[in-house]
Image (tube, rainbow, N blue to C red):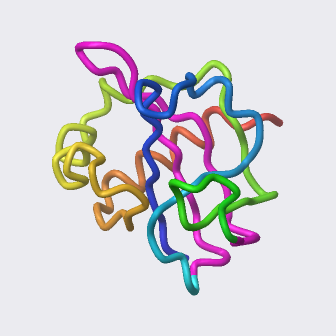
Amino acid sequence: MLDYVVYHKAEKMGYPALNINNLAIYTKKSTDGKKGCRIWLIAGEGSPRKYYLRASFLISNVKPSNKPEFISMITGTDGQLFDPMPLLNDEKWMPNFVKEQGNFAFGFNQIKNDKAIKGLRQILLANTLR
């Protein structure tokens, strides 16, 4: 299973990440063959920028976007929305992760940083509803 990051910038999208109420993301990129992979939805807010984990889920469905500025809508059923959203800025792996992801300018993008994946999974486990 591969891990992918998607970034939600409230200023660009027009609404804060906490307004996202389902396990879904939109992308301009190709999503062929991604079913079963994990999405990490990271939100950026404020200046200086604070990064939060809004959601994590396994891709269960990919369909054409109902928003004209995007190609695909990816949804999942096995995952979680976080509220409150865990802050990521203080994680040791975060600065390198942000740099590797081009300050999240790449959009829907595979995570190849093993430390970031391990760190995100630890945060997921620590914040999973039981």
| Residue 27 sits above or below residue 10 on the image | below
- Look at the image and tell me in which quarter the N terminus lies: bottom right
Give the total of numbered labels.
Answer: 0
Q: Residue at x 32, y 62 (%)?
A: 114
Q: Quarter of the image holding residue 93?
A: top left
Question: Farthest residue toward the top?
Answer: 47
Q: Nearer the viewer, residue 102 or 100?
A: 102
Question: Farthest residue toward the front?
Answer: 68
62 drawn magenta: yes
Q: Nearer the viewer, residue 117 or 58?
A: 58
| Residue 32 sits above or below residue 94 on the image | below
Q: Residue at x 50, y 33 (%)?
A: 13
| Horizontal side, residue 108 vs residue 53: left or right | left
Q: What span is in magenta?
A: 34-63
64 drawn magenta: no
| Residue 118 sits above or below residue 30 on the image | above
| Horizontal side, residue 121 vs residue 45: left or right | right
Question: Farthest residue toward the bottom?
Answer: 33
- Look at the image and tell me in which quarter the C terminus lies: top right
Q: Nearer the viewer, residue 29 or 61?
A: 29
Residue 24 on image: x %, y %: 69, 51
| Residue 110 sits above or below residue 128 on the image | below
Residue 83 on image: x %, y %: 67, 22
Q: Residue at x 44, y 23 (%)?
A: 87
Q: Nearer the viewer, residue 105 or 65?
A: 65
Residue 70 on image: x %, y %: 53, 58
| Horizontal side, residue 2 vs residue 50: left or right | right
